[in-house]
């Protein structure tokens, strides 16, 4: 008797396409890994950031188990003093909509992206595995931002509210092991690490491309953590005119008043456009939580990467170029990269080996998750 493939309803407030920011890349990659293992994935997009016709067409084609687009409701004022309440961004009507879809489709699991969407898990009832992909830690995230001198943005709540959301799941997914350890202290549900590593393009890409436009480059969105990191890097590089660099992504649209005069590539349709324009990728991130998607994507592209310890958080990094103490040390490493062919070769090799190690780990984790979905839970 042939066993039926498990059916999973995935609920996300972020579009999976295009993968032009880290969370979208994570959502798309998770679906790709599960479908490659025989899981039938149906996708509901609660369009909190809008959805263009091109996005809708791309997601409809990708999610072969079915695609649903639900327009968002206006978000009311924060439900708690100084923080969002857990369900402020997820209306009861969405939970009811998901429950109806589940009753019609009888899914084996419902997988929700982000803890503030956990309300939908309450309506699906018993007999279905309820999975929560956290992406990040949101309990007291605003306090972590303020410690870095940043104004908190996007969603943040208290640890108590986050714990209430985690309790709605039968299985919690963490994006890296250090955060899995934290979540195990906040959740009674089992926690599985499911990292992120895009396909390793350097295994098949022709390296005879045109010469890069810059030796060093940074690609990022305009979130507060990235803006603070780029401003710190700019201040350091303004005193090092012998180290030209390139800036790409949505962050290049911000009026940052940079003194180091980087080459501005701006937003790129595909990340590959950026990787072909630079020789070495920079990530001077200070602080932050979660896995730094820009780091793993650069590693997957096969480029040498220089960054801080925070930029490589959650990765088994060993090379000195993958653990700079601060931005000043990143600049010193950039100078060493320019000076020494031995250093360049070693960083390139270490970056590719790290990508291979991470890809192997993520494949094993995806195998475990697919097996749990097929079995109905831990």
Image (cartoon, helix red, strand yellow):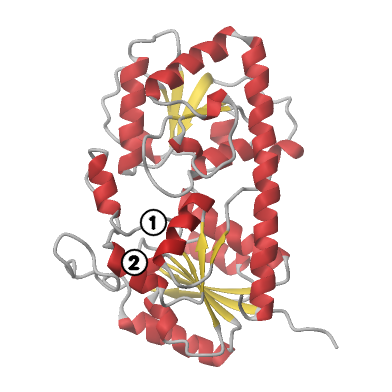
Q: Residue 124's x, y, as percent?
A: 47, 87
Name the residue tied to disc 1.
Answer: 137
Q: Residue 280's x, y, as percent?
A: 56, 24
Residue at 33 percent across and 40 percent down: it is 225
Q: Which badge, 2 or 1, comes first in the chain's sequence?
A: 1
Nearer to the camera, 146 or 55: 146
Q: Is residue 193 above or below residue 109?
A: above
Q: Residues within 10 Å of mark 2 (few under 14, many from 20)?
A: many
Q: Residues within 10 Å of mark 1 (few under 14, many from 20)?
A: many
Nearer to the camera, 71 or 204: 204
Q: Residue 221's x, y, as percent?
A: 40, 42
Residue at the front extreme, as displayed = 185
Residue at 48 percent across and 29 percent down: it is 307
Residue at 75 percent across and 38 percent down: it is 203
Name the residue tied to disc 2.
Answer: 162
Q: Quadrant of residue 243?
A: top left
Q: Is residue 49 above or below residue 8?
A: above
Q: How many marks?
A: 2
Instruction: Tell me the SS state at disc 1.
Output: loop
Report the quarter where the N terminus lies: bottom right
Say whether marks 2 and 1 touch (CB < 8 Å). yes
Residue 14 in sight from this viewpoint: no
| Circle on res. 66 | none
Instruction: Tell me the SS state at disc 2.
Output: helix
């Amino acid at each position: 008797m042939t066993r039926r493939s498990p059916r999973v309803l995935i609920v996300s407030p972020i579009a999976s396409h295009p993968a032009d920011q880290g969370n979208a890349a994570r959502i798309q990659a998770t679906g790709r890994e599960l479908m490659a293992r025989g899981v039938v994935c149906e996708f509901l997009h609660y369009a909190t950031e809008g959805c263009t016709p091109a996005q809708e067409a791309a997601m409809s084609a990708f999610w072969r188990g079915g695609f649903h687009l639900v327009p968002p409701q206006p978000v009311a004022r924060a439900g708690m003093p100084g923080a969002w309440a857990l369900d402020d961004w997820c209306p009861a009507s969405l939970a009811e909509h998901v429950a109806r879809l589940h009753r019609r489709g009888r899914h084996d699991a419902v997988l929700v992206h982000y803890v503030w969407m956990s309300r939908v898990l309450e309506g699906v009832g018993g007999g279905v595995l309820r999975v929560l992909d956290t992406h990040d830690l949101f309990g007291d995230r605003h306090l972590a931002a303020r410690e870095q001198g940043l104004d908190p943005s996007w969603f943040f709540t208290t640890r108590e509210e986050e714990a209430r959301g985690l309790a709605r799941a039968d299985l919690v997914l963490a994006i890296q092991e250090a955060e899995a350890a934290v979540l195990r202290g906040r959740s009674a549900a089992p926690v599985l690490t499911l990292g992120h590593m895009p396909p390793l393009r350097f295994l098949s890409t022709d390296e005879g491309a045109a010469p890069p436009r810059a030796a060093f480059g940074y690609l990022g969105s305009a979130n507060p953590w990235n803006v603070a990191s780029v401003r710190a890097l700019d201040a350091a590089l303004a005193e090092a005119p012998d180290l030209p660099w390139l800036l790409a992504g949505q962050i290049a649209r911000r009026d940052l008043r940079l003194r180091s005069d980087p080459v501005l590539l701006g937003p790129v349709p595909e990340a590959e456009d950026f990787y072909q324009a630079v020789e070495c990728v920079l990530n001077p991130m200070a602080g932050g939580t979660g896995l730094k998607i820009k780091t793993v994507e650069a590693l997957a592209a096969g480029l040498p990467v220089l960054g801080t310890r925070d930029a490589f958080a959650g990765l088994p990094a060993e090379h000195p170029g993958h653990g700079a103490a601060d931005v000043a040390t990143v600049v010193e490493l950039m100078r060493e990269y320019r000076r020494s062919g031995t250093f360049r070769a070693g960083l390139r090799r270490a970056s590719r080996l790290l990508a291979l190690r991470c890809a192997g780990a993520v494949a094993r984790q995806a195998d475990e998750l697919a097996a749990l979905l097929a079995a109905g839970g831990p």
